[in-house]
Amino acid sequence: MKTYEITLKPNSGFGTPLKGDTIFGHICWQAAYDPGLFGKSIGQLLSDYKTDPFLIVSSAFFKIETNGTTVRILKRPDVPLYKIFDLSGKTKKDLIKERKVLKGKRWMKIPHNQRIESLKIVEYVSDNELIEEIISDSEETKRIRLLVSEFTQPHNTINRLTNTTGEGRFAPFELDQNIFFPGILLIIYVGIREDIDIKQVQMALKRIGDMGFGRDASTGLGKFDVISAVETNLFEMGSTNSNACYTLSPSVPEKDIFSHTYFTPFTRFGRHGDILAKSSNPFKNPIIMADEGAVFVPVNMENTLKKPYIGVGVSELSKAQPVTVAQGYSLYIPVYVEV
């Protein structure tokens, strides 16, 4: 399996978070409508998905330029704070104060060509600290203090009999969307099987970006451009003395493979998209996953390193479409964590 880093430029707000399993689902719909996209039908692509996935997609992270250096901004690992920060020699009062500050440092900076040798020597930063590095001189950006801001958009539905809003289905309502810091770039990592070409994945993403990703795409949300795709090796970003896996998308880890697990539970209440969204039963069975940023310590790291991904393919999710699968796989970066 080859791994690529794909750079995206958001052009609008997003109604749906850019998580790996959701992006994978969108690409599958592109393959379903255009069998020529990957040279195979969606049925052929998914026929051996549980043993040999044709595609694995990460969640979206950030990429910034600071001091002439490209820096990747990944989610802080979901491990206890004492495993990534030095909290020794502090009083209980100091720990309470500092813990609040450290919890705000929810991003880790990975400069280009620099390895994550240990989770304790990585630089962790807050939204404010990151924005201070990338902020421009314009008054507009000086007021922004978050990389991703939540914006509430009011909507109206007009009753054509009265030419105004009203009650019930005609009552005004609000929907939330996520707005990214102006000019910031996003990156996703994709792992592709040998029979898949990265240009095919780029084309699928371009179509998604043109049409819109996720909720309310028809009203202008979810638009992005595909800037570039560069082959990369995630293992070269990680530790040379690794004992754990830092995941890049929500995943369903295999049983009896890991001795220690650190993660934030994420429940995917899946719903079919496209034409199946209007079916008699558009809802999928819920899946409890480990959110991106999880750290799994394998019983046998040497065996785990034989594959660039962990997790399982999830099936038996839908009564409306029995062949439906969900991406329970995740690409990972090998890291070292004190156990």
Image (cartoon, rainbow, N blue to C red):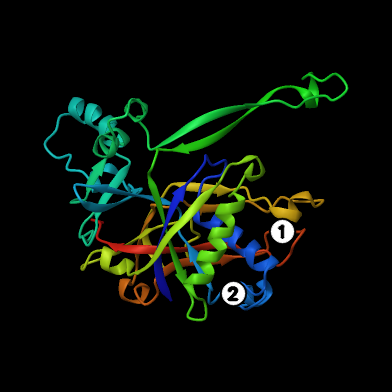
Can see residue 256? no
Q: Amino acid at mark 1?
A: Ser
Q: Residues within 10 Å of mark 1 (few under 14, many from 20)?
A: some
In the picture, measured across the screen, residue 164 lies left or right of residue 186, that is right
Q: Quadrant for the N terminus, please.
A: bottom left
In the picture, measured across the screen, residue 121 lies left or right of residue 194, that is left
Q: Nearer the viewer, residue 264 or 182?
A: 182
Residue 38 got which mark? 2
Instruction: Determine the residue located farthest toward the bottom in the rendered image.
Output: 195
Instruction: Determine the residue located farthest toward the right in the rendered image.
Output: 161
Up-down: is 12 above or below 256?
above
Up-down: is 244 above or below 119?
below
Instruction: Determine the residue located farthest toward the front in the rendered image.
Output: 138
Residue drawn at x 75%, y 22% is 171
Q: Which residue is mark 1?
A: 318
Residue 234 sits in which quadrant? bottom left
In the picture, measured across the screen, residue 11 lies left or right of residue 105, that is right
In the picture, measured across the screen, residue 67 lies left or right of residue 140, that is left
Residue 205 percent across, percent down from the top left: 54, 60
Residue 42 sits in which quadrant? bottom right
Residue 164 percent across, percent down from the top left: 79, 19
Residue drawn at x 75%, y 27% is 157
Q: How many marks?
A: 2
Mark 1 or mark 2: name the one nearer the start of the chain. Answer: 2
Can see residue 118? yes
**Local SS, label 1:** loop
Up-down: is 79 above or below 7?
above
Residue drawn at x 25%, y 28% is 96
Q: Quadrant for the C terminus, please.
A: bottom left
Between disc 1 and disc 2, the foreground one is: 2
**Local SS, label 2:** loop
